[in-house]
Amino acid sequence: MIVFRNWAYGGDFGDTPNNLNFCLNGLIWPDRTPHPALNEVKYCYQPIKISFTNGVIKITNTNFFQTTKDLEFNWVIEGDRCKLDYGTLSQPTLEFNWEIEGDVGS
C-alpha cells in the first residue's frame, strides 16, 4: 500500500483559477486526522459551563435561545480509577444566558 503524504496548496498542480492563499492551519488535517486544537475548540463551544469552587457549584447556560429543560445533569466522583459515587443533579430549568449557584452539602 502506497501512502501519499504530500500536502499541496492551490496552484501547486498548475490549476487555474485556484485558491493561492489557502493554508493548512484548520482544525482537521488534510488527511482528516484531528488537530490537537480541536479539543480546545470543543471545550470553548460547549453551551453549559460548570465550575466547582470552595464547595459551591456554579452552572451557567450560555445558550442564547435554549433552556436546560431537556438536559439531565449527571455527576461522578472518581478516585484511584474507581467510581466512588454518582448521581443526578437536580436543579431548576435555566433560561438562556442564566446562571445558578448552590452549596454542596457534606
Image (tube, rainbow, N blue to C red):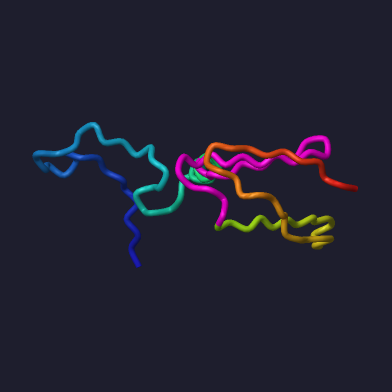
The residue closer to the viewer here, 15 or 92, is 92
Query: Percent from the top left, x then y, of residue 46?
Result: 53, 45
Res 4 → quadrant: bottom left
Could you tell me which residue is drawn at 75 percent across and 57 percent down?
76
Indicate left or right for 57 with 45 as reference. right
Residue stretch rendered in magenta on the structure:
45-69
Q: How many marks?
A: 0
Tell me if residue 20 comes above or below residue 104 in the rendering: above
Query: Percent from the top left, x then y, of residue 16?
Result: 9, 40
Res 89 → quadrant: bottom right
The residue closer to the viewer here, 80 or 4, is 80
Could you tell me which residue is drawn at 76 percent across and 41 percent down?
102
Residue at the farthest left position? 16
Residue at the farthest bottom position? 1
The residue closer to the viewer here, 86 or 34, is 86
Res 81 → quadrant: bottom right
Could you tell me which residue is drawn at 66 percent across and 55 percent down?
73
The quadrant of the rendering that contains the N terminus is bottom left
Query: Percent from the top left, x then y, of residue 25?
Result: 38, 37
Whether 1 is among the magenta residues is no
Indicate left or right for 105 with 12 as reference. right
Query: Percent from the top left, x then y, of residue 87?
Result: 76, 61
Could you tell me which residue is drawn at 19 percent across and 40 percent down?
12
Indicate left or right for 88 with 84 as reference. left
